[in-house]
Image: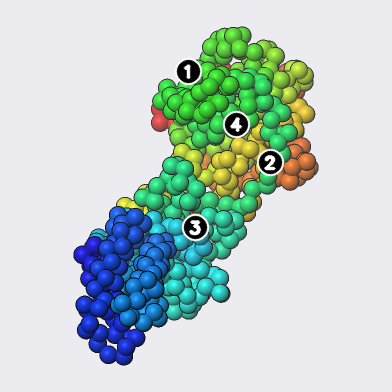
């Protein structure tokens, strides 16, 4: 670029003089000082401003400011030469023409070089993308993507009417509601649409995705600029659209006094600490300033993962929150009792459970033992040790269950209801909710993997529906519900609208830029295969057994009024059930469950792998 400028600077002066005189300027002897002095000084100014350190392929519009400053300095030097070197007899107005010409030549040469180098470097192997969002975040994303990533931005999409038809950072801004949008993007060679709307609320993001879904392009999202600048993410981490954007909703701001009531400054024990819900409970317990957090987990790997994660949090690393990692099963009463004796536990969040319906259906004794008897053991140990709060993580599958997993969770609820009058010093409660997004075994990662593999996407039934909620929102509501408990409460969370799983699968296929292959579209990309309901699986889930439900001080937490057994009757029934379980008498176990759990409708056939008729 120095060699080019050694040509452009004298050329701009010569062209300026020629334009001023109206004829080719040839008297170079008269203007020798102007030519030599101007070139030398201008090169020094450009060096000082760093114009020769810039990498042309990554040149930004900010460079125009530096070029303008350099040209302004050069122009002022020319003016000084014209004023203080009258022997040259050059017209003083030449400096204006020279300045304009030099700015155009120097600036134009550099941006032409950027275009040529950018095309040669990025034309092969880079994915051409449209950026949805032409605001500050979108512009920053374009600037960062242009710097040698695998993506080549070619157009902006934005709803703002005042931006349509304009160019920003060299990219045209197009109205996404343009009827010919798909044809335009195909003509530009666009393969993906990247969302860059970090400030949009859940409703707006959902509206954008609803609009983009029918288009034949892969829709993905980029990390927020704040995450990139803070080092939490990089632009290479372009990812699939969060399913929360499809199903999520605006969370109700939590009430700080409810979040901290059972946690702040207290000793908290979380069972099932390595699971999806348990690990998020641990994160939020640390955030709320517990004095001590005990992680109780049967899986060594799960316990190791959450322990290592939490120890990176400053409050744990600096000793503000004491962290205890304890291996053990909720069925091991002596192990639990030793922990409660050693550490004065105030609050227990009981998330330990087997939750996968088909697996528990095939292993019913183990499921009942862990989910029902394990809850009873943990609750009695906690109450005997003087814990003030015991919160059970329950499920919508406990309502009129058709599977052993749901029946076992309803038994766990009944255990706490029966224990409450026996232990008035401990406040027992249970929080019932549906599926959470991103948990282990969730359909979302399964569908994503099946789509990546080319299909088929497996759905059990075309009409099956489920409730969904994000894990952080569910855990926040669990903590707040526990703080509102009065004793024996059954809390039910507002899960929003139910989601048809077939529709969810189809939307995920469409947002991957693919088409569902069916009778109407035999040439589609991904087939949806209906595999039939699994043993114990329901078409629809419910959250309430009866009709009696009351609101609470939180708009998304309700309190249900449901029948329960007195402790003596429950203890007698559970003891009988336990004896049948020890004998592996599955018909007797099923009969006991049907008698104990309201609405339980077992699967027609015993699914236990070891059972023989």
Kindly check if marks 1 and 3 are in contact, taking CB atoms under 8 A apart as contact: no
Q: Name the residue under label 4.
A: 287
Judge left or right: residue 354 versus residue 23.
Answer: right
Element assignment for label 3: helix
Q: Which residue is drawn at 73% across and 24% down?
A: 427
> Residue furthest toward the bottom?
22
As rendered, which of 57 and 107 lies closer to the eye? 107
Q: Which circle marks residue 137 in the picture?
A: 3
Q: Using the rendered image of the protein, determine whether residue 526 is visible from the camera's viewpoint.
A: no
In the shown orientation, is residue 405 left or right of residue 215?
right
Mark 1, Cα crowd under 10 Å, few <14 / some 14-19 / many 20+, is some
| Quarter of image, res 155 | bottom left
Residue tagged 2:
254
Q: Which residue is drawn at 29% across and 72% down?
A: 34
- Mark 2 vs mark 4, CA separation in Å: 13 Å
Residue at the disc numbered 1: 327
Give the vertical position of 287 relative to 494 (above or below): above
Quadrant of the rendering where the C terminus is positioned = top left
């Amino acid at each position: 670029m120095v060699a080019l400028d050694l040509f452009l600077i004298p050329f701009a002066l010569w062209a300026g003089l020629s334009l001023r005189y109206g004829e080719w300027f040839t008297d170079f002897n008269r203007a020798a000082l102007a030519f030599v002095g101007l070139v030398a000084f201008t090169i020094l100014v450009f060096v000082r401003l760093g114009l020769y350190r810039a990498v042309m392929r990554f040149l930004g519009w900010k460079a125009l400011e530096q070029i303008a400053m350099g040209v302004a300095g050069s122009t002022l030097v020319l003016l000084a030469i014209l004023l203080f070197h009258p022997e040259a007899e050059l017209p003083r107005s030449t400096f204006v023409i020279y300045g304009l010409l030099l700015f155009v030549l120097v600036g134009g040469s550099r941006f032409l070089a950027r275009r040529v180098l950018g095309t040669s470097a990025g034309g092969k192997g880079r994915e051409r993308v449209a950026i949805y969002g032409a605001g500050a975040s979108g512009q920053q994303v374009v600037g960062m993507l242009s710097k040698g990533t695998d993506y080549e931005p070619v157009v902006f999409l934005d709803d703002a009417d005042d931006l349509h038809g304009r160019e920003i950072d060299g990219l045209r801004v197009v109205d996404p509601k343009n009827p010919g949008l798909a044809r335009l993007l195909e003509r530009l060679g666009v393969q993906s649409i990247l969302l860059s709307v970090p400030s949009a609320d859940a409703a707006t993001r959902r509206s954008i995705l609803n609009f983009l879904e029918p288009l034949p392009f892969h829709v993905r999202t980029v990390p927020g600029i704040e995450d990139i600048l803070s080092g939490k993410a990089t632009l290479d981490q372009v990812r699939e659209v969060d399913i929360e954007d499809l199903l999520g909703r605006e969370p109700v701001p939590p009430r700080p006094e409810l979040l901290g009531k059972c946690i702040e400054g207290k000793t908290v024990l979380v069972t099932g600490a390595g699971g999806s819900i348990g690990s998020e409970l641990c994160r939020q317990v640390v955030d709320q300033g517990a004095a001590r957090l005990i992680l109780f987990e049967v899986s060594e790997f799960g316990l190791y993962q959450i322990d290592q994660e939490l120890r990176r949090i400053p409050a744990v690393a600096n000793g503000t929150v004491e962290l205890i990692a304890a291996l053990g099963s909720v069925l091991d009463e002596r192990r639990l009792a030793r922990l409660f004796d050693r550490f004065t536990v105030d609050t227990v969040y009981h998330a330990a459970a087997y939750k996968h319906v088909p697996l528990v259906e095939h292993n019913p004794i183990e499921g009942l033992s862990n989910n029902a008897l394990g809850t009873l053991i943990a609750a009695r140990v906690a109450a005997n040790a003087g814990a003030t709060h015991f919160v059970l993580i329950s499920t919508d599958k406990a309502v009129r269950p058709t599977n052993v997993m749901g029946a076992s969770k309803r038994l766990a609820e009944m255990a706490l209801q029966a224990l409450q009058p026996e232990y008035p010093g401990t406040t027992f409660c249970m929080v019932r909710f549906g599926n959470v997004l991103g948990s282990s075994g969730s359909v979302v990662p399964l569908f994503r993997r099946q789509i990546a593999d080319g299909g088929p996407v497996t759905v059990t039934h075309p009409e099956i529906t489920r409730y969904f909620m994000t894990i952080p929102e569910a855990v926040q509501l669990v903590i707040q519900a526990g703080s509102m408990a009065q004793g024996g409460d059954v809390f039910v969370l507002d899960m929003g609208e139910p989601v048809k799983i077939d529709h969810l699968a189809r939307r995920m296929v469409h947002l991957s830029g693919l088409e569902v292959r069916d009778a109407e579209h035999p040439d589609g990309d991904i087939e949806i295969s209906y595999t039939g309901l699994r043993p114990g699986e329901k078409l629809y889930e419910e959250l309430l057994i009866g009709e009696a439900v009351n609101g609470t001080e939180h708009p998304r937490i309700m309190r249900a009024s449901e029948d329960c057994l007195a402790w003596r009757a429950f203890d007698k029934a559970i003891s009988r059930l336990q004896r049948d379980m020890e004998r592996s008498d599955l018909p007797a176990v099923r009969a006991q469950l049907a008698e104990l759990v309201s609405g339980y409708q077992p699967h027609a056939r015993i699914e236990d792998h070891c059972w023989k008729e």
